[in-house]
Image: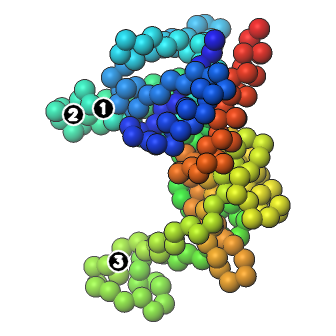
Amino acid sequence: MRRVLIVADAGDANVAAVAAVLRTRNVAALLASPVHLALAGWRHSMSAEGHVQTCLALGERIVDADSLGAVWFRAASLPAPRFRDSAAADRDYAQAELHALVVSWLQSLGGRIVNAVDGNGLCGPSWAPTRWLTEARRAGLPIAPQVMATSARFVRGWRGSPFAARQPLATAMPPAEHRVLVVDDRTVGGPDASIAAACMRLAAAARCRILRVGFVETGPQLAVSMVDPGGGSLDGEEIDAMAAFLADLVARSCHVTR
């Protein structure tokens, strides 16, 4: 029987809740933290034909990638605990190598990974906040007002020290007041059909099966203030939707390999 592997920070209650719902659907969920991956024994190889084989020793658990029907990588970063006492340059190098290894493994999972990753991202594309907002606008979503400048002195009405005047300036986005969660081919929490459809277009552009979009009220309309491919905090309906999607992904991946 194939399993779901969920990689999330220790103490992530949302992941524990999703795993509990998966068990009610007779789907085994294996939870691991970024530290577990960093301390794991890895065997990661690629054949001349391009077939990737990966096996992890997570403590006493041996996890063959071929036994996984879905992998939800929710953590945004990887530590390097084995190099905690090393020189900074060595620690940074080790962390970069571990990151590259994990990205290669995630890339090899194909349609079983949530979300698709680029050369650097772990839970989705490694886009800067400004790139996310740009892509949201392209998808047809209004964007919350924000001031950005290479030097604060270029912003009309700005006041501060001479040193601060030479620094880049970006106003902080207000906290989201409304939230939409894209889960594969549906949305949870969309205020109307047009917003939901635009969020789906944004998720498709980012190759994200899971995507959190936060909105603030700007006059008569809602505007995007944040986008999170990790999904952020989940409520009851969102937890059920995530579990249903992961269970379906496992079923589909098993069917493909038969």
Q: Viewer-proximal residue, 252 or 85? A: 252
Q: Residue placed farthest to the front in the image?
A: 24
What residue would you read off at disc 3? 166
CA gap between label 3 and label 2 equals 36 Å
Q: Earlier in the sequence, mark 3 or mark 2?
A: 2
Q: Residue 84: which disc? A: 2
Q: CA distance from mark 1 to mark 3?
A: 35 Å
Q: Count residues near mark 1 (Cα–Cα under 10 Å), then give few for <14, some for 14-19, many for 20+.
A: many
Image: 14 above or below 219: above
Amino acid bearing label 3: Arg
Q: Secondary structure at mark 1?
A: loop
| Mark 1: amino acid | Ala
User: Is there a contact, CB below 8 Å, between mark 1 and mark 2?
Assistant: yes
Q: Are marks 3 and 2 in contact (CB under 8 Å)?
A: no
Q: Give the residue drawn at x 67%, y 26%.
A: 25
Q: Residue flagged by tag 2: what amino acid is it?
A: Arg
Query: Vertically, is 204 above or below 215?
Result: above
Q: Residues within 10 Å of mark 3 (few under 14, many from 20)?
A: few
Q: Is residue 27 left or right of residue 166?
A: right
Q: Nearer the viewer, mark 1 or mark 3?
A: 1
**Label of residue 80 in the image:** 1
Q: In which quadrant is the C terminus drawn?
A: top right
Q: Secondary structure at mark 2?
A: loop
Q: Measuring 40% from the left and 17% from the top, which residue is drawn there?
A: 58
Q: Residue at x 41, y 32 (%)?
A: 33
Horizontally, residue 29 falls left or right of residue 141, namely: left
